[in-house]
Amino acid sequence: MGARRCLAWARVAVAVAVSPRCWFEATRTVAVLAGARRTHRLALRPDRAWLAFRLETAYGDADAVPSPGEVLELLAWQARARRFAASSSGRAR
């Protein structure tokens, strides 16, 4: 990974670190993305091939890095979606 890309991912990490409202969702997301690999290694990161595929489909470039704002927006959306699912799960349809 190049220095520019490392710096871009570091900016994303800092944006999450200074946003306490996102900590739980970010931790949960990293654990889910790491999947079964986390039981064998301490490094909690998604599979490189999977991440490259997701970045390619989202940005048209496997080496793209989402902006800190996009990551924070995604985490907020995930939290809202989880709360909505939990609040509506007991209702009759």
Image (spheres, helix red, strand yellow):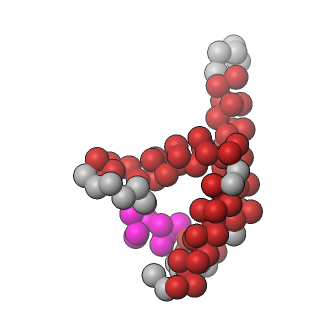
Is residue 71 shown to the viewer in this render? no
Left or right: where 44 falls relative to 71: left
Residue occupying image coordinates x 74% and y 63%:
69
x and y, in percent, of residue 13 in the image: 59, 62
Is residue 17 shown to the viewer in this render? yes
Out of 51 and 4, give the one closest to the viewer. 4
Numbered-mark total: 0
Query: On the image, which quarter does residue 78 sit in?
Result: top right
Residue 5, compared with residue 44, is above or below; it is below
Residue occupying image coordinates x 63% and y 55%:
17
Does residue 51 belong to the magenta stretch?
A: yes
Q: Which residues make up the magenta segment?
A: 46-54
Residue occupying image coordinates x 69% and y 31%:
83
Q: Main secondary structure of the magenta part?
A: helix
Residue occupying image coordinates x 59% and y 41%:
24
View extreme (left): residue: 40
Left or right: where 67 falls relative to 63: right
If the image is split into quadrants, where does the N terminus sit? bottom left
Query: On the image, which quarter does residue 91 sit in?
Result: top right
If the image is split into quadrants, where does the C terminus sit? top right
Does residue 45 belong to the magenta stretch?
A: no
